[in-house]
Image (cartoon, rainbow, N blue to C red):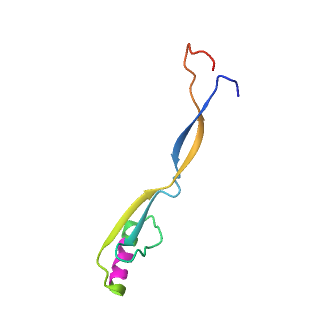
C-alpha cells in the first residue's frame, strides 16, 4: 500500500443470517433462542405465559453485521500525509 492510501471501516450485513428476532419475558428475563421468524419468537412468549403466568414481554429484532476495512478514496489535489 502506498503512503497516500489510507483505510477506513464500513459495515456489511451478513446476508445469510438476515434479520433475527428474540422474545423476552420482562418479568423474569428468560428469552427464546434468536430466530429469523418473528412469529416463532411470539409463539415462545405465548408458551412462556402458559408456563409462568408472566404477562409482560418484548420482541426485539436485530441484524448481525461485519466490519470490513476499505480504502479511502484519494482526494484530488491533496498533499501526502
Look at 50% across and 55% down and name the residue there: 64
Q: Main secondary structure of the magenta part?
A: helix
User: Residue 14: horizontal and vertical position, in percent?
Assistant: 53, 52
Look at 39% across and 71% down and name the residue there: 24
Span colored in magenta: 42-49
| Left or right: 53, with 64 as reference point | left
**Figure check: 48 above or below 14:** below
Q: Quadrant of residue 30?
A: bottom left
Q: Quick one: 25 or 12, which is closer to the camera?
A: 25
Determine if the magenta segment contains residue 45. yes
| Left or right: 60, with 79 as reference point | left
**Figure check: 62 above or below 27:** above
**Figure check: 60 above or below 77:** below
Look at 42% across and 67% down and name the residue there: 22
Taking the view exactly as shown, the residue that stands out farthest to the bottom is: 51
What is the total number of numbered labels drawn onto the structure image? 0
Q: Quadrant of residue 4?
A: top right
Determine if the magenta segment contains residue 8. no
Q: Quick one: 54 or 37, which is closer to the camera?
A: 54
Taking the view exactly as shown, the residue that stands out farthest to the left is: 55
Taking the view exactly as shown, the residue that stands out farthest to the top is: 77
User: Residue 61: horizontal and vertical position, in percent?
Assistant: 40, 60
User: Residue 78: horizontal and vertical position, in percent?
Assistant: 57, 15
Q: Quadrant of the N terminus?
A: top right
Q: Quick one: 16 or 52, which is closer to the camera?
A: 52
Q: Quadrant of the C terminus?
A: top right
User: Residue 10: horizontal and vertical position, in percent?
Assistant: 53, 40
Look at 63% across and 18% down and name the residue there: 80
**Figure check: 45 above or below 71:** below
Amino acid at each position: 500500500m502506498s503512503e497516500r492510501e489510507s483505510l477506513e471501516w464500513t459495515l456489511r450485513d451478513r446476508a445469510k443470517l438476515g434479520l433475527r428476532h428474540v422474545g423476552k419475558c420482562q418479568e423474569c428475563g428468560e428469552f427464546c433462542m434468536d430466530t429469523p421468524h418473528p412469529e416463532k419468537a411470539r409463539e415462545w412468549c405465548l408458551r412462556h405465559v402458559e408456563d409462568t403466568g408472566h404477562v409482560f414481554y418484548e420482541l426485539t429484532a436485530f441484524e448481525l453485521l461485519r466490519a470490513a476495512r476499505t480504502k479511502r478514496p484519494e482526494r484530488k489535489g491533496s498533499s501526502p500525509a
